[in-house]
Image: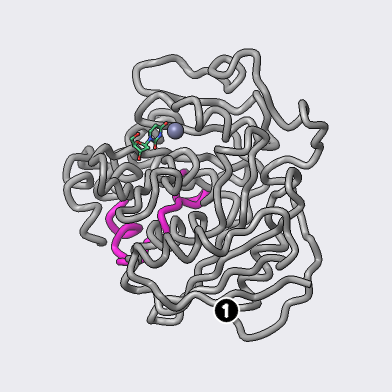
Amino acid sequence: MHSRFHSAFAQLAENLQSALAPILADEHFPALLTAEQVAALQKATGLDEDALAFALLPLAAACARADLSHFNVGAIARGISGTWYFGGNMEFIGATMQQTVHAEQSAISHAWLRGEKSLQAITVNYTPCGHCRQFMNELNSGLALRINLPGRAPHTLKDYLPDAFGPKDLEIKTLLMDEQDHGYKLEGDALAQAAIKAANQSHMPYSNAPSGVALECRDGTIFTGSYAENAAFNPTLPPLQGALNLLSLNGYDYPDIQRAILAERADASLIQWDATAATLRALGCQSLDRVLLS
Ligand SMILES: O=c1ccn([C@H]2C[C@H](O)[C@@H](CO)O2)c(=O)[nH]1
Ligand SMILES: [Zn+2]
């Protein structure tokens, strides 16, 4: 089991610990539970889905990388496929606060990048901040998304974001997690192709500037992140954040990054290159290349 889970795991109920132990045994447990695993955990614990998600939250919070605040937020996004995706907040020392990933964004981006088509619910250990409520309002589940918080009755995003501003106000019909393919040809080596593929799936209806990042670890594993824009612009999740989030959730660390590639258009209205290079440099990674989409 990855060391970040040790103390949270030790505090879980015994029946949950026994059922989870084989799932968590892999150092690179992908921080998600398939529908079958969720069903098995329910059977072992007698918990309903909502109660099980709350019981698992300490493990999601253990995925947080809150090196600045030491405030660990955990979230579990439940996909319509039945898979559950963990998320934790990520802070990047040596970068800017704007690079931070909130736990809700982490879980949602995780689900999206793993091919989930829509979300049913999200369980979080603290009340979601305004930025996260706005981020969630970009999703194709819309205001119907269920939000479960400890000690509160389940509500929907509609309750937590009254009088909402969103994609509709800008006449945008394609929403986050809707299937998208911007059709750029896959070229170059495997890492370059992974970055282009991620850019092809990006959600950028406001700028029309696709981008994707691919990170290669020393053991050859590749993680990709797609750019996810938001109607309110600032809650946008850059492509590097998506890739770093997956890498970290899968039990890898920044020194494991061997090579990084950003795919974007040279003539785009918004450019990721400088922010991507700056954040990677802060994490000790100097080897960033750029593939130009054309
Ligand atoms: O809804 C929230 C509010 C805050 N945080 C994180 C961001 C930052 O890392 C830390 C302090 O705000 O908590 C979240 O992940 N979700
Ligand atoms: Zn937030």
Q: Write down the residue under mark 1.
A: 191
Drawn side of residue 14 relative to residue 217, left or right: left
- Amino acid beneath label 1: Leu
| Viewer-nearest residue: 48 or 103 | 103
Which image quarter holds the N terminus?
A: bottom left
Q: Hey, which quadrant is residue 95 in on the image?
A: bottom left
Residue 75 in the magenta stretch? The answer is no
Task: Give the colouring mode of the picture.
Answer: one colour
x, y percent for residue 154: 49, 19
Q: Hey, which quadrant is residue 187 in on the image?
A: bottom right
Which residues fall within the magenta stretch?
20-38
Q: Is residue 244 above or below residue 53?
A: below
Tell me the element at label 1: helix
**Residue at image location 56% in from the left, 66% down from the top:** 213
Q: Is residue 47 above or below residue 112?
A: above
Dividing the image into four quarters, tell me where ligand 1 lies. top left
